[in-house]
Amino acid sequence: MRAVLDTNAIISALLSPSGSPAQLLRAWQQGAFELIVSRSLLTELERALAYPKLRKKVKPEEARQVLQWLAGSAIVAEDPSGPPSVRSPDPGDDYLTALAQSEGAALVSGDGHLLQLAGTPPVFSPAQFLPLLET
């Protein structure tokens, strides 16, 4: 199984080590699924981790280590050049649906706009995706 984790899921994992997003990252580390990232996803994550309100909770060194860990351990796919067949109400999220679709991966997000989508790729919340790893 392959998955793209939205940046909000990765940040949630950093902020709440016992929550579903953190459990997903641990499951990935244990080989339960393949994590797909792209340059755009890593850039968005880096930008978000630099926000002042997050800097108070995720120190710059920790943010750098997480980015290096993801870039070095996840599958780094090319950003798709075309639009996805399923579009988000928030056009800024289209790169995520395009990435998941092009890589044959599920999209895991806490974003309500993305969770409302139906079709390809399948979209799950972290809590919805976790039980799928057990089958």
Image: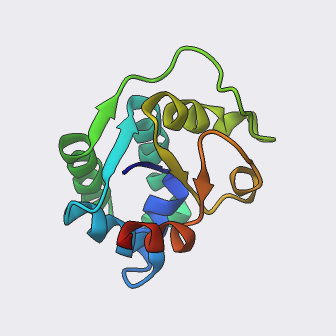
Q: For this view, does 66 lie left or right of residue 58?
A: left
The answer to whether residue 1 shows anywhere in this view is: yes
**Which residue extends farthest front?**
135
Residue positioned 57% across, 30% down in the render: 98
User: In the rendering, at what x and y percent does residue 117 appear?
Assistant: 74, 48
| Foreground of the two, 128 or 59 | 128
| Foreground of the two, 52 or 119 | 119
Q: For this view, does 58 lie left or right of residue 91?
A: left
The scheme the figure's colours follow is: rainbow
Is 40 drawn above or below residue 56 in the view shown?
above
| Foreground of the two, 44 or 103 | 103
Residue positioned 73% across, 47% down in the render: 118
Q: Quadrant of residue 55?
A: bottom left
Residue positioned 49% across, 27% down in the render: 102
Is 17 drawn above or below residue 76 in the view shown?
below
Quadrant into which the C terminus falls? bottom left
**Which residue extends farthest top?**
81
Residue positioned 51% across, 38% down in the render: 100
| Foreground of the two, 106 or 26 | 106
User: In the rendering, at what x and y percent does residue 134 appear?
Assistant: 37, 73
Q: Quadrant of residue 125?
A: bottom right
User: In the rendering, at what x and y percent does residue 111 appear?
Assistant: 67, 58
